[in-house]
Image (spheres, helix red, strand yellow):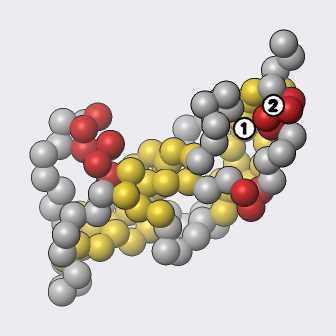
Amino acid sequence: MNRYSYKFKAKKQEPANKSGVPEGMEAEITTEAETYDITVSGLDRDISILWDDTVTGVLDLEKWMDDNNVEELTPGNYTIPVTFNLSEDIMVENDVNIHIRLKNQDTNN
């Protein structure tokens, strides 16, 4: 089996798909970049169907909390890794992290 690498641009979208934002809070992406280069590898048949606009990232705050032994999020700035909506047969070769600001919905804090 041959492996195939493909580099493309992932675009920042607002509102981003942010999973696990605590009730009563909102998350704002503070990273200034509009696109992110990611390199994926996999079989040619799996990679060849990908296009820049078909790959989306997810900021999974619950997973980040579990991975970092965080029990409760408070307002502040966080760096969260992005996971992508790719099949299990496709690997993302580089890490993409997004900076977010978590604040209470009813205030600016």
Q: Where's residue 44, x and y in %? A: 86, 30
At mark 1, the secondary structure is: strand
Identify which amino acid the numbered label 1 is placed on: Thr
Examine the rendered structure and indicate whether residue 92 appears above or below residue 3.
below
Q: Identify which residue is drawn at 81% across, 31% down.
A: 5
Read off the residue under disc 1: 39
Q: Identify which residue is drawn at 18% across, 86% down.
A: 106
- Quadrant in which the N terminus appears: top right
* In the displayed structure image, the side of residue 107 where residue 54 appears, left or right: right
Give the mark nearest the N terminus, 1 or 2: 2
Q: CA distance from mark 1 to mark 2?
A: 7 Å
- Quadrant in which the C terminus appears: bottom left
Report the residue that reaches farthest toward the top.
1
Q: Where's residue 104, x and y in %? A: 19, 76
* In the displayed structure image, the side of residue 20 where residue 100 appears, left or right: right
Q: Nearer the viewer, residue 49 or 109?
A: 49
At mark 2, the secondary structure is: strand
Q: Identify which residue is drawn at 29% across, 48% down.
A: 62
Question: Which numbered circle lies on residue 87?
Answer: none
Q: Where's residue 16, x and y in %? A: 49, 67
Quadrant of the image occupied by residue 81: top left
Examine the rendered structure and indicate whether residue 42 appears above or below residue 108.
above
Q: Where's residue 103, x and y in %? A: 24, 73
Q: Nearer the viewer, residue 87 or 82?
A: 87
Do callouts 1 and 2 mark residues in contact (Cβ within 8 Å)? yes
Q: Identify which residue is drawn at 85% across, 32% down.
A: 45
Does the rendering let one see residue 88? yes
Does the rendering let one see residue 93? no
Read off the residue under disc 2: 5
Examine the rendered structure and indicate whether residue 46 appears above or below residue 58.
above
